[in-house]
Amino acid sequence: MIRVALVDDQAMVRSGLARILSPEDGFEVVAECADGRQAVQELPALEPEVVLMDIRMPLLDGIAATAQLRAAAATIAVLVLTTFGEDEVLWGALEAGAAGFVLKDSSAEDLIAAVRAVAGGAAWFDPAVAPRILEHYRLRVAPAGRQAARLELLTERERDVLRLMARGATNGEIAATLYIAEATVKTHVGSIFGKLGVRDRAAAIVFAYDHGVVRPGATHTSG
C-alpha cells in the first residue's frame, strides 16, 4: 500500500482524491489537511510516501509548505496539484522540492499513475504542464547555469540513466532495463546531479528535456 496524504483547502477536492486513491488500487490515505500549516505540523510524524499538495491555500501556501515539509522530512515526495493557468507557480514549486505536477482535472488513471511514479522515486510532469516548465527553465535558470552544467560531462551510461529517468522510470526499473544493480543506478544518479548542477530528479529531467536528451511528447512526459 502506498501511503498518501491529501492537502487542499476544499473538502470536496480531498474527498474526490480519496475516492480515486482507494485501497482497491493500492493506496492508503493516512491524512487530510486543509492548509499548508497543518500539513507541515502533522505529516512528518505520519510519514506518508506521497503528499498531494494544492498551491493556493490559507495560512501557508503550497510552495512554502512543500519547502518546509521537504526540509523536515526529505523522504516524503510532494506531488503538486495545479490548474492549467498557474504558470507562475510551477518553477517555484520545483525549486521548493516538488517531485512533479499533476493537473486537478486529470483523469483518475493519470492521477494514479502520477502517485505511483512519484512513490517509486520518479518525477511526474503532466504533458500539459511540461512545456511551460521548460520555458520557465530557459528564461530563469538556463542563462546562469549553462556554463556550469554541461551535458558532455556525462558518461554514456549516465546518459542512458538520465534518458530513462526522464521517461518516468524508477531506480529499480532503470536497473532492470540496463542490467545493473540498483545501488549502481543510485551512484549514477548522484553523479548526474553533480555534473549537471541540479539538486534533484525533477530538475535533472527538466535539464534533459531542455537539452534534447529526450523530446517532449515522445512519452507521457512523466519522469
Image: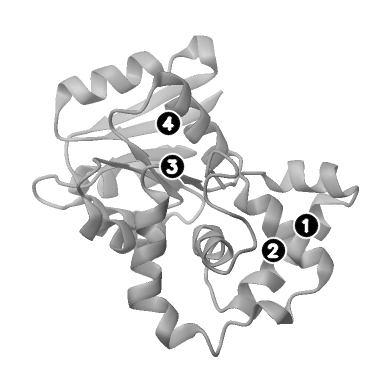
Lower sequence index among marks 3 and 1: 3
Q: Amino acid at mark 2?
A: Val
Compute the Cα span from label 2 to label 3: 24 Å
Residue at left offset 52%, top offset 70%:
199
Query: What is the image's colouring?
Result: one colour
Q: Dot 3 corresponds to which residue?
A: 127
Residue 31 picture location, percent across and down = 33, 29
Q: Dot 4 corresponds to which residue?
A: 4
Compute the Cα span from label 1 to label 2: 6 Å
Residue 213 picture location, percent across and down = 65, 62
Lower sequence index among marks 2 and 3: 3
Dot 2, how many residues are within 10 Å of its Cα: few (below 14), some (14-19), or many (20+)? some
Q: Residue furthest left?
A: 58
Q: Amino acid at mark 3?
A: Pro
Q: Dot 1 corresponds to which residue?
A: 185
Lower sequence index among marks 4 and 1: 4
